[in-house]
Amino acid sequence: MGTDLACPLCDRAELPDDLEVVRTTGTWDERTMPPGLRQAHRVAPGTWARLQVVEGELRFRAETEPVIDIMVDGRSPQAIPPDVEHEIDVSGSVRFFLEFLRPEEG
């Protein structure tokens, strides 16, 4: 409602426990990833995303507090909080996909 709320899980980019996958993208590589992912963008309010690297690595940066600026590889997925500006930078060979998650209904 126009007021910023403190969200420790968002700042730490930790997925809440009560989420379920509602959509999964196809797998992209450094040539096929959508151009919009390379620039600052946001996941919709109320929706989390999980970045899954299948092969290689990429740089993930999010405007959390403090800022997250890390390399992500296949060892652990990267959570992306709702409505937080972030971007993905790919400089080498990589394959990855995104899962979108929302709170479980019921």
Image (tube, grey):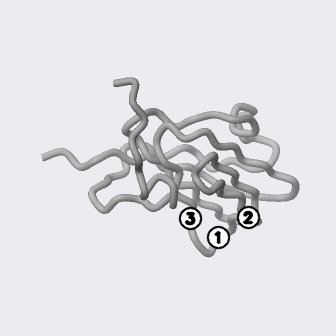
**Circles 1 and 2 in contact, beta carbons < 8 Å:** no
| Residue that lies at the very extreme toward the bottom in this rendered image | 75
Q: Measured from the top left, where is residue 87 in percent x and y?
A: 69, 43
Per the rendering, the mark at residue 77 is 3
| Residue that lies at the very extreme toward the top in this rendered image | 2
Instruction: Judge the density around disc 3: few (<14), some (14-19), many (≥20) Cα neighbours within 10 Å.
Output: some
Q: Amino acid at mark 3?
A: Pro
Q: Which residue is identified by label 2?
A: 71
Residue 17, quarter of picture = bottom left
Q: Measured from the top left, where is residue 48 in percent x and y?
A: 44, 47
Instruction: Judge the density around disc 1: few (<14), some (14-19), many (≥20) Cα neighbours within 10 Å.
Output: some
Q: Secondary structure at mark 3?
A: loop
Per the rendering, the mark at residue 74 is 1
Q: Residue at x 81, y 43 (%)?
A: 31
Residue 22, quarter of picture = top left
How far apart are the alpha carbons under marks 1 and 2?
A: 10 Å
Q: Secondary structure at mark 2?
A: strand
